[in-house]
Amino acid sequence: MSSSPDSALPVPAPDTAAAPRTRASRSPWRSLRHRSMRWWSLANFVSNAGTWMQLTVQNLLVLQITGSAAATGLSMSVQAAPALFMSLLGGAAVDRWPRKLTAAVSQALLGAVAFTTALLVALDRLDMTSLMVLAAVTGIVATVDGPACALLGNDLVPVEDVPSAIGVGALVHNSGRLAGAALAGVTVGVLGTASAYAANGLSFLFVTAVIPFLRPAPGAAGRGEGAARLATASRRGRGGSGGRGKDMTVREGLAFFVRRPRLLALAGITGISAVFGRNYQLTLAVLVTGPLAGGAGSFGTVSTVLAVGGILGAILGARLRRPSVRVVGMLAATGGLLQVVAGLSPSLAVLLVMVLPMAVVESVSDTAGTAVLQTDPPAHLRGRVLGVWSSIGTVWGLGGPPALGLLMEWAGARGALVTGGLLIAGTIGAGLLLRDRRTPSPVTLRAREGDLPEREALGTAA
């Protein structure tokens, strides 16, 4: 149960008790007022640290077994491939099954995979075939685990605190990454490579043990209308009409996404940003070591500034109360313009000055976009919508770097940054202008839809 006294109250009307809560609700840490969210954040920190311990040594292990860089890349692709083909099914499973049970079982299965890998490594029985099978199983389980854990975290806070929960989650992820990478060297040096996998298995079991004690918060994004629709669907199913089965189809989630203009706009904004920006480990690495005549140490400094900017951006993003697609678009366009200036940097010092706001803007945009994605759909469709998003994101992840590489071959590092930034800012700016011309006045549209209270509560108007 929440530890905040006022979390048990319904969301107040704008002209009543909202004013006294304004200062508290602007805090980036406001989601941590809820006890279940504090436990969930701790569990995720432990899990992220274990995962990054494993990832730190995994590629080296593949190289040790095969001696092939291509095999290393193949193992990563095998683990990512299920997200492309099975995310819709995974999202449907999250919508159909109890969320806490689904998250607990998926975490336990991932722990079992980690322990199996640790045992095979300890016995020196891990070969390429078993490695690929384990990578595929991990990828399949992740198609369910990802949306289940994301939506479970949102259930632990009121809807207005979802941006804070997402921002805190980003901080937990980055902190776990740093801790896991630091612990990996010590653990592997003392106990061997298998210990990293065993530690990751234990971290999954810790999350599994915490989940049964988590309690949803009153006013959470997964309650209310979505719960009512699920109950209606369940009653129809028991009545023999097949309503629940129909409501739980993959097709319904895909149809909702395609017919939802704000989600399509969010996909377009994120897609163009993912392809022509954000891949800074590629573009900035070439810029620093090429035109700016720096070395590995210089790029390490740039990477550190990027990480710091990401953390600052997560904190700022957590302060949002009503993120929208328009906010995401404006931030992404701003990031594109900053990328243009970074591409024209005459020196490493100027580049470092530009990299920090680039990372901050990107992180805030990610937090806002994730909040929209996870709160805009009805509760009974959110798993499937996240499944659609995961499939689309996998396409961007696989296709973005090669496309950007071709652009760099044609225009060089500076040209790729400048051209990509202009494409991002120009496309998003044109889209916003076109939308403003075509959209009726907000008062008329809301009166026609008749759902003003819900949309204001979610804060996801495009």
Image (tube, rainbow, N blue to C red):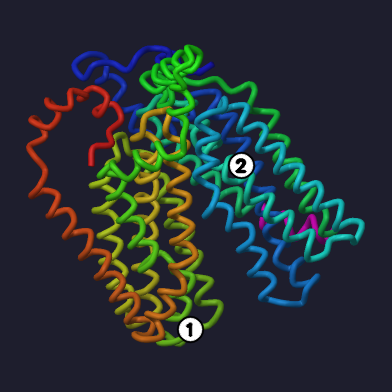
Residue 257 visible in the displayed image: yes
Which residue is depicted at the point 77% across and 53% down? Answer: 196
Magenta highlight on residue 190? yes
Q: Which amino acid does label 2 sit on?
A: Phe
Q: Residues within 10 Å of mark 1 (few under 14, many from 20)?
A: some
Q: Horizontal placement of 432 versus 308: left or right?
A: left
C-alpha separation, residue under disc 2 versus residue under disc 1: 34 Å
Q: Horizontal placement of 201 versus 368: left or right?
A: right
Q: Where is residue 97 in the image (x, y as percent from the top left)?
A: 57, 27
**How many numbered discs, if any?**
2
Q: Name the residue under label 2.
A: 45
Q: Horizontal placement of 226 versus 340: left or right?
A: right
Q: Which amino acid does label 1 sit on?
A: Thr
Label 1, secondary structure: give it.
helix
Q: Mark 1 points at which residue?
A: 289
Identify which residue, 359 or 430, lies in the foreground.
430
- The answer to which image quadrant residue 213 occupies is top right
Q: Where is residue 421 in the image (x, y as percent from the top left)?
A: 29, 69
Label 2, secondary structure: give it.
helix
Q: Residues within 10 Å of mark 2 (few under 14, many from 20)?
A: many
Q: Is the magenta stretch mostly helix, strand or loop?
A: helix
Span colored in magenta: 180-191
Q: Which mark is residue 196?
A: none
Which residue is depicted at the point 58% across and 23% down? Answer: 214
* 17 relative to 428, above or below: above
- The answer to which image quadrant residue 271 occupies is bottom left
Which residue is depicted at the point 53% across and 42% down? Answer: 89
